Image (cartoon, rainbow, N blue to C red):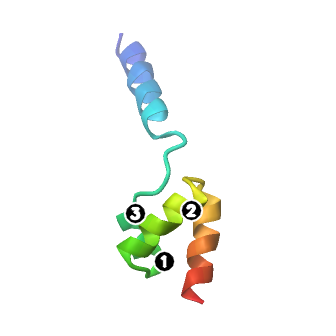
Amino acid sequence: MAKDEDRQAAGLRGRTYAGQGYDATYLARKHGITRQQARDLIRKVGHDRDKLNEAAASLKG
């Protein structure tokens, strides 16, 4: 029974976080940019983490 519950909980976690983009605050802290810059990047680039990391790195210089 516990295994079924664990699988269900793991499945829910996977669906909840899979494909989620960055939070603007996390992105800003990670790359040393402002929260507004992070929000603007998310609006411009979308929620793809790789693209956001590249765009944030190019902002920094």
Mark 3 or 2: in front is: 2
Q: Disc 2 designates what residue?
A: 44
Quick check: marks 1 and 2 in contact, CB under 8 Å?
no
Q: Residue at x 55, y 42 (%)?
A: 19
Indicate left or right for 11 with 5 as reference.
right
Q: Position of residue 2 (x, y in %)?
A: 35, 16
Name the N-terminal-most of marks 1 and 3. 3
In the image, residue 34 above or below residue 17: below
Q: Position of residue 46 (x, y in %)?
A: 57, 55
Query: Residue 50 appears in which quarter of the rendering?
Result: bottom right
Task: Specify few, some or many for label 1: CA neighbours under 10 Å numbering under 14, 14-19, or 20 or more.
Answer: some
Q: Position of residue 58 (x, y in %)?
A: 62, 81
Name the N-terminal-most of marks 1 and 2. 1
Q: Disc 3 designates what residue?
A: 24
Q: CA distance from mark 1 to mark 2?
A: 17 Å
Q: Nearer the viewer, residue 7 or 13?
A: 13
Q: Residue at x 64, y 62 (%)?
A: 51
Name the N-terminal-most of marks 3 and 2. 3
Secondary structure beneath dot 2 equals helix
Q: Disc 1 designates what residue?
A: 31
Quick check: marks 1 and 3 in contact, CB under 8 Å?
no
Mark 1 or 2: in front is: 2
Which label belongs to residue 51? none
Q: Nearer the viewer, residue 49 or 8?
A: 49
Q: Residue furthest bottom?
A: 61
